[in-house]
Amino acid sequence: MTVLVRLYSVTFLCLWTIVVIQGTDVDKCSKGKGPLPASVELVGCEKPRCKLRRGQIATLNLKFNAPHAIRHMHTKASAKAYLALFFPVTYKLELGDMEKTCQFLTNTKCPIPSGQEVHFSLEILIEDDFPKNQQLTVEFIIEDQDNKPLICAELPIVIV
């Protein structure tokens, strides 16, 4: 009986670890805007194209290692849609205070030493004026005090 309980416990722990580590699949940004973060989780979505409702607050959790000492950081986000086959339209996502990345770190605070693992949680309101049933690619960039990219990720979504 004890061996069976231990086997179930080990199996559960392994499965739980796989789910937690996987996060949400994202793509590397085009044009070399920065490396991918170590992990990305869009809460409630594992596989793109993630479905987000207008009026919803989407929570994105990012983890990355500081490549060098960082005094402060800022976050930028944009969404790209193709309204015609070859006609991209880019929407800047207004992040408000969320642009001040250091204020929303969950495991440390700025300044950050080189090599430190950084956890950042970003909340974005999916505006009511976003085009419904439109496929978008959302780009997230975190830059340091010198506007050098620390991470960049693209996440395909659809507004429902």
Image (cartoon, grey):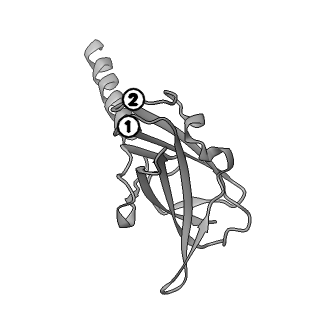
Name the element at disc 1.
loop
Which of the numbered marks, if any, corresponds to residue 113?
2
Dot 2 or dot 1, earlier in sequence: 1
Write the residue at 36% across / 51% down: 36
Which of the numbered marks, if any, corresponds to residue 66?
1
Write the residue at 58% across / 44% down: 122
Q: Residue furthest top?
A: 2
Q: Position of residue 54 (x, y in %)?
A: 69, 61
Write the residue at 37% across / 55% down: 34
Q: Position of residue 151 (x, y in %)?
A: 41, 49
99 shown above or below 28: above
Quadrant of the rendered structure where residue 98 is? top right
Amino acid type assigned to the residue bearing label 1 in the image: Ala
Quadrant of the rendered structure where residue 12 is? top left
Q: Residues within 10 Å of mark 2 (few under 14, many from 20)?
A: some
38 shown above or below 149: above
Q: Residue furthest bottom?
A: 85
Distance from disc 2 to disc 1, alpha carbons, whole Å, reads 7 Å
Amino acid type assigned to the residue bearing label 2 in the image: Pro
Quadrant of the rendered structure where residue 1 is? top left
Q: Position of residue 136 (x, y in %)?
A: 54, 69
Write the residue at 62% across / 60% down: 93
Q: Are marks 2 and 1 in contact (CB under 8 Å)?
A: yes
- Name the residue nearer the viewer: 76 or 59: 76
**Placement of the C terminus among the 4 image quadrants:** bottom right
Name the element at disc 2.
loop
Q: Position of residue 31 (x, y in %)?
A: 37, 67
